[in-house]
Image (tube, rainbow, N blue to C red):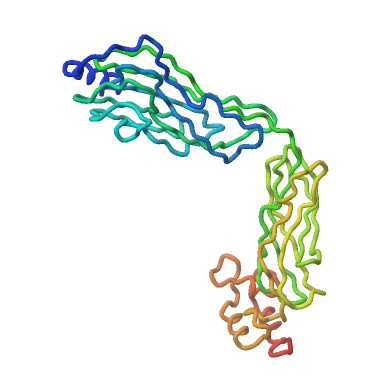
Amino acid sequence: MKTVQAILPAILIFLSLVVTINPVSSGATVVKVDPPLVEYHTNATGQQFTVAIKIVDVVNLYGFDIKFRWNTTFLDYVSYSVRVPKDTYPDGVLWKPIIFEWKEVNTTAGTCWIAYSSRYPAPSFNDTGTVFTMTFRVKYHPAQYTANIKLELYSTDLVASDASSIPHTTQHGTVILYALAARHDVAVVGVHPLKTIVGQGFSMHINVTVSNQGDFTETFNVTVYANTPAIQTKTLTLTSGNSITLTFTWNTAGFAKGNYTIWAYAWPVPGETHKEDNTCSDGKVLVTIAGDVTGEGLCDMQDISILVDKFLAEPGNPLYDPNCDIQDDLVIDMADISIAVDNFLKDP
């Protein structure tokens, strides 16, 4: 199977028999990445930017075959837009009708291959225009070193209407991700109470996910709160870039009945300046009379019926409901039902 490089000149040789030949550029033509330099001095992870691949000061252009690549360690491909023909895109290149086109983007390899040619009776292109634009997202901004990322035009063929090659130079692009100052940064990224209803005087568990988003191993405290009162504090050591889920136990003895907002706080480490994500609040828990699994404020036959329906259910069983596991021992059994019976219709 013929390659695009072989097919494109063959097409243009045929076209040269019917197209009026214009003078070919003497070498002032440039294929370039515009802008040639994109710089980020602060953390650019997640930010997007767009570059254009342009042909500048070309004469008698009738086709092109351009290959472009980038570093996938630092950049993610987002989208591209081909600007052919100029009849449709005022900033584009080539005139219609178009006889050949090839578009291929390989996001794994980080390559883009674009090839087009006009056909008779299209006039040759004599101007400056954009071949295509490409949008990237910064995937990773290194903290302790500067990354110089090349946006490389690694193969560029420009063909005149007589199938001859148009002399030109190339100008690659560069993205610079400047080294960031080493930082201390711990965060709470998730709070998940395992129950929404808990019997007063009984316990429940709360999962809290914390991460070390800084550049140093940190030892720090994490405290979980129910409204204002602290539930429990844990101390942990976490290496840079890692996260962990901690399980806290809330013994509701001494807490009044009512709704509580559960939140967690990672105590700032020395040198930490970004503290907005040290706090995370997610979820409300109702403290009520033990056996009130519906949260209506009273333990009645509806609650007991629900417990009976879920008898002997354990985690993994579709019938298991942590709110019905009054003792929080991972099984809904006679002990839970007995608690509800003991509190049947008691004044809440």
Outermost residue to the left:
18
Q: Is residue 194 above or below residue 150?
A: below
The residue shown at (34%, 34%) is: 89
Q: Quadrant of the C terminus?
A: bottom right
Left-right relation of 148 to 4:
right
Q: Position of residue 121 (x, y in %)?
A: 19, 25
Classify 46 as above or below 173: below
Q: Quadrant of the N terminus?
A: top left
Corner quadrant of residue 158: top left
Image quadrant where residue 258 sits: bottom right
Q: Residue at x 75, y 49 (%)?
A: 275
Where is 46 relative to 10, above or below?
below
Residue 19 coordinates in the image, percent (x, y): 19, 18
The answer to which of 162 and 1 lies nearer the viewer is 162
Q: Residue at x 38, y 23 (%)?
A: 128
- Position in image of residue 281 (x %, y %): 69, 60
Q: Which residue is at a point 47% across and 39% down the rendered structure image?
A: 78
Q: Position of residue 162 (x, y in %)?
A: 24, 14
**Most foreground residue, 336 or 219:** 219
Image position of 225 (left or right of 32):
right
Q: Is residue 58 above or below residue 193?
A: above
Q: Please state which of residues 186 and 138 is positioned toward the viewer in this rendering.
A: 138
Left or right: residue 295 compared with residue 19 = right
Q: Is 66 positioned to the left or the right of 149 in the image?
A: left
